[in-house]
Amino acid sequence: MKHKTVYAKILWVIWGTAVLALTACQSNTPTLLTTAEGTDGFQNFAWLLDGTAVYFNFGRSELWKFEVATSTLSLIASINQGE
């Protein structure tokens, strides 16, 4: 199994929106895998030891998972801020 090296970058735009870009480098040319954006911020990145996925929080209410092999971004858990 060939592993991809994936980098997570958080870019801030002028309106205060956080933009997350996950890119893979398989040779010398980075390839954009996925992007996401929001106003509450991305934080707490945790990679699996084998490098196959990364988990991260979006704000204080959502937990996301990005699977490298399939380039799949999934919402794992979400709470209602009003509760």
Image (tube, rainbow, N blue to C red):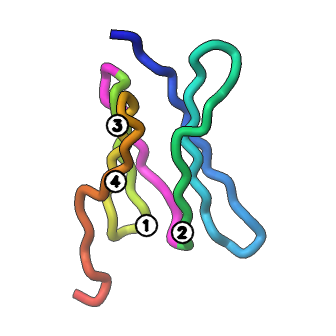
Q: Pointer 4 and pointer 3: residues touching (CB < 8 Å)?
A: no
The span shown in magenta is 40-50
Instruction: Please state the horizontal and vertical placement of residue 11, each as a whole percent of the image.
Output: 67, 53
The residue tagged 1 is 59
Tell me the SS state at disc 3.
Answer: strand
- In the displayed structure, 10 sits above or below 24; it is below
How far separated are the C-alphas under marks 4 and 3? 10 Å
Along the horizontal axis of the image, is 11 left or right of 42?
right
Task: Name the mark nearer the viewer: 2 or 1.
Answer: 2
Q: Is residue 48 magenta?
A: yes
The residue tagged 2 is 38
- In the displayed structure, 25 sits above or below 27; it is below
Q: Pointer 4 and pointer 2: residues touching (CB < 8 Å)?
A: no
Amino acid type assigned to the residue bearing label 2 in the image: Gly
Q: Residue at x 33, y 64 (%)?
A: 62
Give the class, few, some or many, for how many residues have Cα within 10 Å of label 1's Cα (few <14, many ≥20): some
Tell me the SS state at disc 1.
Answer: loop
Amino acid type assigned to the residue bearing label 3 in the image: Glu
The residue tagged 3 is 67
Give the class, few, some or many, for how many residues have Cα within 10 Å of label 2's Cα (few <14, many ≥20): few
Along the horizontal axis of the image, is 51 left or right of 36?
left
The residue tagged 4 is 64
